[in-house]
Amino acid sequence: MQKISPSESLFIQQGVENNIRNDGRNRVDYRNFAIETGEIIHANGSARVKLSQTEVLVGVKAEITHIQSEITSNLQQSDTSKRLVFSVNCCPSASPEFEGKGSEFLNIELAKQLERLYSHPNVIKNLKLTNPKISSINNNNNSNKIKKENDKKVKEEEEKEDIKEIITNSGDDNCFSIVSGKYYWTLYVDAIVLDSDGNLFDALSIACRSALHNTRIPRVKAIQGEYEEITFEVSDDPEDTLSLSIENVPICVTLTKIGSQFVIDTTLQEELCMNARLTVGVNSLSNICSIQKGGIDGLDPTTINQMVNTAKVVGVKILNIMDKTLNEISI
């Protein structure tokens, strides 16, 4: 376990009290972060986020899951919450703390935090068709382009009818269903911490949201065969996909109490000086989606209210920046 000397801890605490942290930020300043999507070729979606020296890579894999017909309604409801399966692996080279079995508890804690963040059924709003990108064509082929576009429109209208039937059969409460009550998509979200300089909760939530934005699921048509057997016809067109709406997907904003004050986006050294931590899940509507307390010390109600209000403001600001960046990447 990493340690910090008493003199270093006192220096950091005094800086926080005076609203000047050791890297020049004030208590509510967030470090710059970079987002890259499509990093893993064979995944349905992926993203890499670098928050200062903290670096996280997330991949999303979609698989078709069969719901057993004999399960009860209570089991079916709990099964619905497992449409998103999270796993986190802290690379031993990221920090000495992750060597050996030191990362096992942290891996579980990080994965459980992501599960709580995405536990509400309305977090992922719905599946929708992506707009296929039309490649540029030379002016000499204008007539062919018009013909292809007309054929494409006819094909899209026919395919929209097919996909509409499949989606409406799934019900409003389950955007991942392929065949209502029988088959649905399960998204396995796997994250790897490549480097760590603090604030892993926030970095992971930003990376997961970016990876889900980048996720493309192939269009699947369910075909009823003999003896009530269901087979699936998967489109081989790489542009014929479904995408996830991340409108209601939240991120984590972690606030750490050091001394009598709290800060956001802590570095690794600042985390070694913390008394308590509050991780708040916030979406673009400034709604609170989850709250998790960490650290050995308690928090009084006044401090908690201040932390939550700060998390709302900071979370909405980060989400606006994220959405703008992701839209620019998608163009």
Image: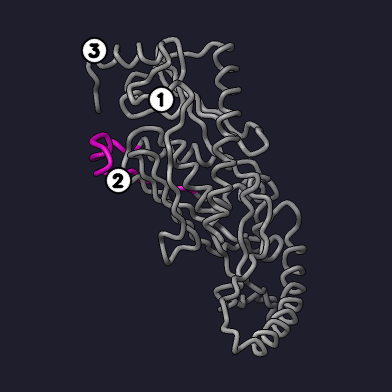
Q: Which residues are magenta?
A: 86-104
> Would residue 155 be counted in the magenta stretch?
no
SS class, disc 3: helix
Mark-to-mark CA distance, 3 and 2: 30 Å
Amino acid carrying label 2: it is Cys
Identify the residue under disc 3.
Answer: 7
Kindly indicate the quadrant of the structure image that contains residue 319.
Answer: top right
**Is residue 260 or residue 80 the one in the foreground?**
260
Identify the residue under disc 1.
Answer: 25
- What residue sits 56% from the left and 77% below the top? 136
Identify the residue under disc 2.
Answer: 91
Ranked by sequence position, the earlier of labels 3 and 2 is 3
As drawn, the label of residue 197 is none
Query: Can residue 226 be spotted in the picture?
Result: no
SS class, disc 1: loop
Residue 79 is situated, as x and y percent measured from the top left of the image, at 61, 50
Q: Label 3 neighbourhood size at 10 Å, few (<14), some (14-19), many (20+)? A: few
Q: Nearer the viewer, mark 2 or mark 1?
A: 1
Query: Can residue 197 be spotted in the picture?
Result: yes
